Structure formats: structure tokens, C-alpha cells
Amino acid sequence: MGIAESRRIGRAAILLALADDNGMDTVFPASWKYCCGRVGSMNSQKIVAALETAAKSGHMIQQGVYRETHALYHAIMEALYGVTRGQVQLGDVLRTVGLRFAIVRGNPYESEGEGEWIAVALYGTIGAPVKGLEHEAVGLGINHI
Amino acid sequence: MGIAESRRIGRAAILLALADDNGMDTVFPASWKYCCGRVGSMNSQKIVAALETAAKSGHMIQQGVYRETHALYHAIMEALYGVTRGQVQLGDVLRTVGLRFAIVRGNPYESEGEGEWIAVALYGTIGAPVKGLEHEAVGLGINHI
Amino acid sequence: MGIAESRRIGRAAILLALADDNGMDTVFPASWKYCCGRVGSMNSQKIVAALETAAKSGHMIQQGVYRETHALYHAIMEALYGVTRGQVQLGDVLRTVGLRFAIVRGNPYESEGEGEWIAVALYGTIGAPVKGLEHEAVGLGINHI
Amino acid sequence: MGIAESRRIGRAAILLALADDNGMDTVFPASWKYCCGRVGSMNSQKIVAALETAAKSGHMIQQGVYRETHALYHAIMEALYGVTRGQVQLGDVLRTVGLRFAIVRGNPYESEGEGEWIAVALYGTIGAPVKGLEHEAVGLGINHI
Amino acid sequence: MGIAESRRIGRAAILLALADDNGMDTVFPASWKYCCGRVGSMNSQKIVAALETAAKSGHMIQQGVYRETHALYHAIMEALYGVTRGQVQLGDVLRTVGLRFAIVRGNPYESEGEGEWIAVALYGTIGAPVKGLEHEAVGLGINHI
Amino acid sequence: MGIAESRRIGRAAILLALADDNGMDTVFPASWKYCCGRVGSMNSQKIVAALETAAKSGHMIQQGVYRETHALYHAIMEALYGVTRGQVQLGDVLRTVGLRFAIVRGNPYESEGEGEWIAVALYGTIGAPVKGLEHEAVGLGINHI
């Protein structure tokens, strides 16, 4: 029981977010859906919007179904906790992010009954709004969907 | 200026934490120090202590120098924000973690003047204190040292 | 000693906030002051302002006296914690609220010496800035005044 | 579209938690499941455990299915944010709670496609570990399940 | 209107907490009450308890009156935010504090109608549970009473 | 070992921030750098920017070196936790600050090996955006640099 070794959805999402060239350096079931992209902003609202838009465009979630939007939203917020480490604020505390993101949807568990889950991974830089004055940051949010 | 492509310390730390067999699937300057390990507990104090002990045993930080302990401590705390996503609490809110960690020390920047930095990466599972009732979590903290 | 069964100020405020038609479905001492209203916004500042304005217009607090404004402010903030559950942010994390609020002022304790207290209750929906993509939320803040 | 007026699951849970005698003063679909109970402690772990145990005993969630435990857990945590208002800590900051809780499971939305949701409502007192030195507190967490 | 220059209660409390020898290096109205003390612990509960005990022993608050305990409690919690800077946790994240505290009670405002307020100031060190591996920390909480 | 009695950098910074007339009422090594200033805003971004600008103008940090900006930034953020006590938000929750700040750079430790540290102290008022409806607040952040 538990998470299947070959279906670690969080690990897959992180590796996709870390990938430089969209070339896959991870494996996961072919049936899983995923999408990747980039977003940079001092405006935290824009980060959330970009992730939601990518998920919808990539058919990661069903648009008319709130429970899917809700699942995705909380996964995004949890990933942002890892990137912001304390207060989910960017411009308000004079910092900006440049992120590569990956969203993966599938069942990471051995039991089929666990159904689908969604993982949102973020990797990039956070820092002052001046090129180079930044360091890396990572976040991962996982939710049942 | 900024972070050198081949010296992304956070990326290196995350990849080390994700590695299943301690076999390296990442490259970074041979001059950098790193250590890896595992820790699992419902007690957040034990997680912090295990990371500090590993860093000292692995000669990642100078033991008699507070500034190095201080730099490491904040990197650990920031990594824990990513894992706990909201409140840095484990047993107090009835959850436990099983983590693989990596600590890397080196200069990720193109400029030598940036000196050394430390990255603490955590990857593993968080969930109820029952085997299998858990999902993955990731955290990364980076600090100048 | 303690809270008098018939003077539970928080319970009264919550019931007022839950009431659909301003019709009272709760009882509390006739000497108590209360006011109700509605506010909806993505802007957390506007929520706070609407509550403060309602409290002043409804003569819930003495306008020239800072200690009363201070007591109300903290009760509002505490109620917002319940609604936002983690970060007191709305538009910054791409969400909006539609709330019904109630503010009640009176002494909920058996002892007269406890003086007056203020309760701020919020009930409504929180969610994406799209009609229907939302769920309910509640918050209650109580302070001595 | 959206939340159905007669199926407001959060409102139902709050009213159940506020009910003094387990007598219902709210209506919701007969098909919905719910359970109520009481828990008091300075130990936040015990509060979480009591809610999880009640949910399992009351057949609110399927025990062998992690996605249901996960949904419940986050609803509990969100309800605790409302009760604790800032830091999810009780004894660690020298305070204790005495709570009545209600857990309700059902579909609050007009669309059948939204499936089931779970609401956790908490109502009671929070204060110093001395009888009477306390005020009321409320929390509500809602999640898709 | 506003805070009277010679009655800045927060400034007075901070200066008392900074004073090395209990010798006053600040002035405030002779009618004001104050007390000072020291507390050190990894246990946040003990810090809160020590401050409450000192306030009661020093007749800073009326013991049988909850509104006074409540006012003091929130002032203590706010002071702890300044000391802990992020999560109100000590031993749980493997750190300890050694603090000097001051509690001052009086009316800092020009208007008599503002009544009494309470200020809690903390000054000392926070760090690893090893002598010397620590830096200074300060916190101030102010509330109407 | 540890902090030298005559080189308590946090105490020095706080006393400078409390000083009414820039006249020093504290002593610290002549070799230390420091600067003081004032800033008031509802916009938290402007507070951070004013402190960073003052630090650069006052040659407290080396402008081209990110590790110094990084050290300063975290010291500022930690000082803001003390001022805001819960959520690092000002205008978003309808409050404003008027602060006097001091930044001090030097080695507070007996050991030369500890190198330089930076302390950021804030003292002033926080409250409603109405003159007089405010109370005092203090924050201190310390970091190795």
C-alpha cells in the first residue's frame, strides 16, 4: 500500500520543473497528464493566474467543475509556501520571482481506489527586482482531485 | 552576473535529495561540499537536530563559528516551510514526515565575491502517522554562509 | 463564573451573520448593540473598511476613542483569519469573498466587572473570481472593548 | 450554478456545532452524512485525533482510502485556523479549548458533477487553562472529498 | 490628540527591558505601574506563564477579571511575534531564549478617555541550545486593558 | 564566548531607533557603521525600499554584492515581523506605520571569527490611517553578513 515507487507524482513534477529543455528526465505512467511553463512576476496574483490558465489550457482540469479548480488552487498555494517561505508575498515585500512550473495529474498510489491527484511544482529564482540579486526557490503542492 | 548555469546550488541539492541511491544524477563543482541523509519523525525538533548533526559530521559548517550555524539554521527552517506549507508543525497537528535530505555548500554565483552559500533540500513524505496515508513534500532553503 | 449561557456573544454574532433575512433567530440581552451588513471584494482593505464603517455608523464604537477602534480592529482581523485560513490575503492570491457580517457589543460574562466585549462574525463564500467557483467560509473575532 | 441555497454545507455544519442539545435547528438533504461530538484539550494533536476518530467511527470517511483522510485532514486544519487565529497552537502558548464539533458530508452544489464535499465546524471556548478565563471561538473548514 | 510625547508606553517598556541593572533610564508618569523580570526557556508555554505570573504578582492586572488577563495575553503573544519572527515556536524548532521582560500599565494618550493600556517588552537572546550560539531579539506588544 | 557585553548590536540598533534627536544614547565600537532615518507608509514595499536605499546610501552594504543585499533583506523582514505581529501587511489590512529606523553593522561577538553582522531596528507607530489612532511598535532583525 502507499505511494508506488514508479508513480511518485511529486518527484515527477519537480523533475519536470527542473528540466532545462522540456526534455524529460523522469518517467511516469503514459496515462498521466502534465504541462509545463514559465512565469515571472512581482505580482503573486499573476503567478496564481498563470498556473490556473496553463492547467485549463493543458486540459489538466475540467473547467466547469469547481472541485477540480479547488483542488488545483490549494496545490498552487501549497507550492507557493515553499517558494515564499513565510509570507505568500512578492511585490508587497519588494521581491520578484522567475519560475518554471510543472503540473502533473495521475494516481501515485498502488490502490486504484485512491483516484487522481494533482501535483504543482515550482522552481526558479526569488529575489530583489534587480537581475542577479536572487537565489533559487522550490515549491511543491499535492492534492487529491 | 547572477547565478551560473552550471552552479545552481538549489537544483543540485534538490536532485541529491531526490536521488534514490546516493548515486549522483547531477553535476556541480568538485570543490563543493555536500552531504545526504535520511530522517523521519513526528517531532520537528528531531528533524532540525538531525540536519544540524549531519552538517557538522559532514564538515559542512565550522562547529565553533556561530555565523555558520546561524546560516544553516535559517536554511533548514526555510526548507521546512516548503515541507509543512503553513505551520512548521508535525506531531502537534498529528502528522509525521519521512525525509531524505541534502546539504550543499559552494558559490553558485559567477562573481567570486559572492562567497559561499548553503542549500538545504528536503524530499520525502508527509502524512498521518499510518504507513501509506501520506503524500510527497519538498522544501529548499538557501542562505549565504 | 464565566460566560453566561444566555449571553454567548460569539454564538449570537454567528447566528446573525448566518441569518438570511435579518430576522433574528437568536436571542441576547436587549441592552446589547448589534449591526449587520454585507460586503464583497477581492480587496482585503475594503473588507476591513466596510466593517469599520458599519461599526461607526451603527454606533457600535465611539468614534473619537482609539481604544474602541483598536478593539474592533483586532476582532475584525481575527475574524478574517477564520475566513482566509492561513494568509490574510484575497486578490493577492486570486480569490474573492462575498460576506455577510454581524457585529455585537455587550457583556457575555456573569460578572458585571468584565465590562463590554465586541464580537465580529463573518459568513459567506470565498473562491475564484468567477461566480459559483466558491465555497463557504466563517470567521469570528472577539475582544474586550 | 454554484452553491444551492438549501444545501449550504458549511452553514449546516456551523449550526450543528452551535446546537446545544443535538436537536437539529438546521435542514439539509436526508442523504447527507453527519456526526457531532465534543473535545477539549490543551493538546492540539488530541483535537485533530478526536475529529479524525469521530469521522471514522461515524463512517464519514472510508478508512482504507487516503484521499478521504487527506480531504478530512485539511478541512480540520482549516477549521483550526479559525479557532486559533494566527498560530495553530494551544498548550504551547498556554491556552486550551473546549469545543463542540460537527462534520457534514454531501454535495452543496447545484451540479451533480461537483460530487461530495466535507465540512468541519468547530464552536466552543478558547482561553487560559482556568475555568471562566475564556471566550468563544469558531472555525470552519471545507474541502472536496 | 494621539500619543503624548512623555507617555510613550512602548518606548518605556523597551527601555526597561533593555536596562541592565533595573536602574531606570527612562521616565514615565509616577502613577503608572510596571514590573520587570527574567525568563529563559526552550518551552514557549513557560515564557507565557512566567510573564502572566509576574504580571499577577506585580499587581499589573486584576486576577479575577478575565478582560485584564485577555488584554495581557494578547500583548504577550504580540511581543513573542517580534522575538520569534515567523512561527511562535522555540524548542519545537530547536531554539531557546533568554529574555529580560518589562510590563508597563498606564495611559499613553493625551485624552483621558483612552483609559489604560498595557505594554509587554521582551529583550534578550534567541538561538541554539548551546551557550554563545545566539543573537539578540526584541518584541513589543501593546493592548488596551 | 558569545555576545560581548559592550558590543550588543541589537541593543545599539534599538536605542538608535528610539533616540529622538539622533543624539546617541548608546555606545558601540567606533569601527561600526550605522545609519538612521524615518519612513512612513501604508505600502509595505515602500518600507522595505526605504530601508534598502538608506543602507546603500549609508554604505552599510556593498551594492554589487548580492550576499550583502540578501543579509540585509532578511534582517528587514525579521524586523517587520515584530512591527506587524502576525501578517506582514499594512495597507492590505487598512493600517499604516510611521517608523524611525536604525541599521548597524559590526561584530557583536567576542570571537573575531564571527565576522560582521547587521541589525535592523524599527520603532514608531502602527494604526489606522487616521492621525492619533495608533500605538507603538518595535521590530529587530539580526543577520550575519
Image (cartoon, coloured by chain):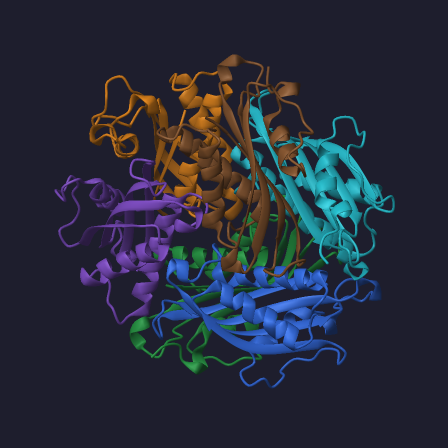
Chain colours: A purple, B orange, C blue, D green, E cyan, F brown
Q: Is residue D97 visible to us here? A: yes
Q: Position of residue F144 (x, y in %)?
A: 48, 26
Q: Is residue D102 above or below residue D78?
A: below
Q: Position of residue E35 (x, y in %)?
A: 80, 39
Q: Is residue E79 left or right of residue E52?
A: left
Q: Is residue D102 visible to us here? A: no
Q: Is residue A140 left or right of residue F1?
A: left
For the C terminus of chain C, give its image quadrant: bottom right
Q: Is residue F137 above or below residue A133?
A: below
Q: Along the line of sight, which residue is nearer the eye, F107 or A6?
A: F107
For the N terminus of chain C, give its image quadrant: bottom right
**Quadrant housing residue E49:** top right
Q: Position of residue D20 (x, y in %)?
A: 65, 72
Q: How many marks can you see?
A: 0
Residue at image position (50%, 35%) is F75
Q: Which residue appears farthest toward the right when viewing the image? A: E31
